[in-house]
């Protein structure tokens, strides 16, 4: 079976599982909402300066929500030894990885699309820069989090305290991507500077780490 | 390895370090504006030189491990990787701390989110997470997982460095940043070079001990695994 066809099968399976259970989407949404509320205690959310911190808060909320989803995405495959079956299957390992990554990307993307209006309302936001760039930044930033996150989630699957392990290894590696997302979003919201450099940085980050993930995934999947 | 060679090299390193201390504290001239505080520089820069060397050794060993993971060369490579990462983190911590000790009297603050400081701190975080992964992953897949993470960490370093430089050039510097190392007086160079060599040799000798320890641990682990296998076999009979 070709890579594309296996990939499509994995993607369909993951989407169907999520559609039936809605575990990841529900927990992510509620989690992100809680982060919004808690941050509004720490900062005055309606002040004019909140425009400068809203980008950071939104990405912190999405980052933590992503961790919630990622922790479930491989744990599902452990039940009934599905992961072992996938390892034995004569299908390209990267199809499994990409299918999972795209599925996670769709879940996190949906949560972001639903949470953005909440941010706009609760933080009284008004986009000063060009709004369409926000979509681009969100897509690139989400891919950056999800591609490394899916990889590290597979990596930490067989460690002790795996749910604790994922953020510990994902956050340090993601720091440059987070910096890019937060600053690009802030630049767009305030309209003070051009986000072009940060969008370039995110694109480079995405290309580099997608390549590294694809090169190393088979080794990590079969690590014994 | 033989004990005499180790003792001789350890003594040589001790002599080299004492000579470096003498050069740094007594021979090198006192800096004009900062005074004696500047002398911590002779420990600060060598620590980072050792840290970056060990991080690079860790990358090389991790790649070697992944390439040769089904051959007898894999276990020594993994022992090199873990020893180098631990020493790199230690030397990087010494560098960060000596930097703070220097910054307080000279800048008036312990820390600033300047480009170079932030990148080094992020580098430190990445390798600490590598050690955390090693600590928390059990069993025989740990070296493979750690080697993969080491490659991620090393690929991240240039991106971290570039992004933080952009971040910091977009904002004004928060404090006066004395350009350290941009114009080092020739009379200070010998003390610096001797200390870099001394720190690298000191790192090498500790690395030697740590590597032997890790190899012994691996052999013990294999012997135990073999032993329990034999036991299971004899019980089955």
Image (tube, helix red, strand yellow):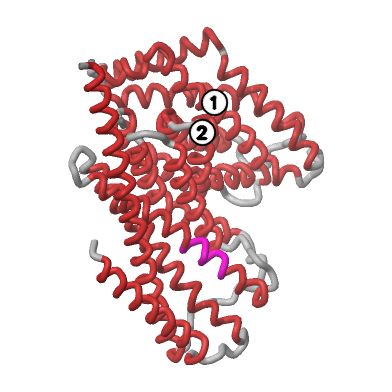
In magenta stretch: residue A89: no
In the rendered image, residues at marks 2 and 1 fall on the same chain? yes
Question: Tags 2 and 1 in contact by the CB under 8 Å rule?
Answer: yes
Q: Which residues are magenta?
A: B91-98
Q: Which residue is mark 1?
A: A109
Residue A30 screen position, x and y as percent: 67, 22
Cα–Cα span, label 2 and label 1: 7 Å
Q: Residue at coordinates 60% horizontally, 81% vertically from top-left?
A: B37
Which quarter shows the C terminus of chain A?
Answer: top left
Q: Which residue is mark 2?
A: A142
Q: Is residue A110 above or below residue B182?
A: above
Magenta segment, prevailing SS (helix, strand or loop) = helix
Q: Residue at coordinates 50% horizontally, 34% vertically from top-left?
A: A166
In magenta stretch: residue B96: yes
Residue B4 screen position, x and y as percent: 26, 71
Q: Could you say whether the residue bearing mark 1 is in a helix, strand or loop?
A: helix
Q: Is residue B9 above or below residue B159?
A: below
* Category of crowding for the residue at label 2, using alpha-carbon neighbours closer than 10 angstroms: few (below 14), some (14–19), many (at least 20): many
Chain letter of disc 1 in the image: A
Is B71 placed left or right of B193 in the picture?
left
Instruction: Name the image quarter holding residue A99.
Output: top left
Q: Residue at coordinates 80% horizontally, 37% vertically from top-left?
A: A41
Say which mark, if any, is on residue B41.
none
Residue A96 screen position, x and y as percent: 34, 22
Give A97 or A205, whichever is nearer the viewer: A97
Residue B224 screen position, x and y as percent: 30, 36
Instruction: Name the image quarter holding residue A34.
Output: top right
Is B91 placed left or right of A63 in the picture?
left
Is A69 placed left or right of B146 in the picture?
right
């Amino acid at each position: 079976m070709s890579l594309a066809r296996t990939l499509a099968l994995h993607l369909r399976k993951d989407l169907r599982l999520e559609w039936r259970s809605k575990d990841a989407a529900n927990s992510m949404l509620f989690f992100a909402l809680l982060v919004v509320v808690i941050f509004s205690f720490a900062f005055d959310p309606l002040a004019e300066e909140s425009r400068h911190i809203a980008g950071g808060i939104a990405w912190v909320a999405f980052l933590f929500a992503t961790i919630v989803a990622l922790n479930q995405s491989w744990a599902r495959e452990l039940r009934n030894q599905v992961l072992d079956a996938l390892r034995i299957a004569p299908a390209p390992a990267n199809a499994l990885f990409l299918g999972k990554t795209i599925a996670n990307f769709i879940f996190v993307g949906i949560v972001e699309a639903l949470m953005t209006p909440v941010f706009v309302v609760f933080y009284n936001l008004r986009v000063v820069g060009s709004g369409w760039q926000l979509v681009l930044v969100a897509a690139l930033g989400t891919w950056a989090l999800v591609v490394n996150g899916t990889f590290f989630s597979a990596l930490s699957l067989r460690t002790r305290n795996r749910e604790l392990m994922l953020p510990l290894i994902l956050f340090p590696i993601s720091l440059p991507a987070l910096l890019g997302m937060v600053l690009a979003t802030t630049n767009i919201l305030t309209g003070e500077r051009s986000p072009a450099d940060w969008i370039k940085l995110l694109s480079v980050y995405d290309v580099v780490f997608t390549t590294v993930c694809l090169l190393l995934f088979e080794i990590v999947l079969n690590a014994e | 390895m033989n004990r005499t060679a180790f003792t001789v090299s350890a003594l040589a390193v001790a002599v080299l370090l004492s000579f470096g201390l003498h050069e740094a504290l007594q021979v090198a001239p006192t800096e004009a504006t900062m005074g004696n505080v500047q002398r911590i520089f002779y420990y600060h820069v060598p620590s980072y030189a050792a840290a970056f060397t060990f991080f690079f050794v860790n990358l090389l060993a991790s790649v070697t491990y992944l390439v040769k993971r089904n051959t007898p060369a894999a276990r020594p490579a993994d022992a090199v990787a873990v020893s180098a990462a631990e020493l790199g983190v230690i030397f990087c911590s010494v560098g960060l701390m000596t930097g703070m000790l220097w910054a307080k009297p000279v800048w008036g603050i312990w820390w600033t989110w300047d480009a170079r400081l932030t990148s080094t701190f992020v580098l430190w975080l990445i390798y600490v997470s590598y050690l955390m992964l090693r600590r928390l992953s059990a069993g025989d897949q740990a070296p493979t997982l750690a080697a993969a993470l080491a490659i991620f960490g090393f690929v991240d370093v240039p991106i971290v460095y570039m992004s933080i430089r952009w971040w910091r050039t977009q904002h004004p510097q928060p404090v006066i940043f004395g350009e350290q190392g941009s114009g080092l007086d020739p009379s200070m160079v010998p003390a610096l070079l001797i200390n870099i060599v001394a720190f690298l040799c000191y790192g090498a000798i500790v690395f030697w001990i740590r590597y032997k320890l890790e190899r012994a641990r691996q052999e013990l682990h294999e012997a135990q695994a073999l032993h329990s296998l034999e036991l299971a076999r004899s019980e089955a009979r």
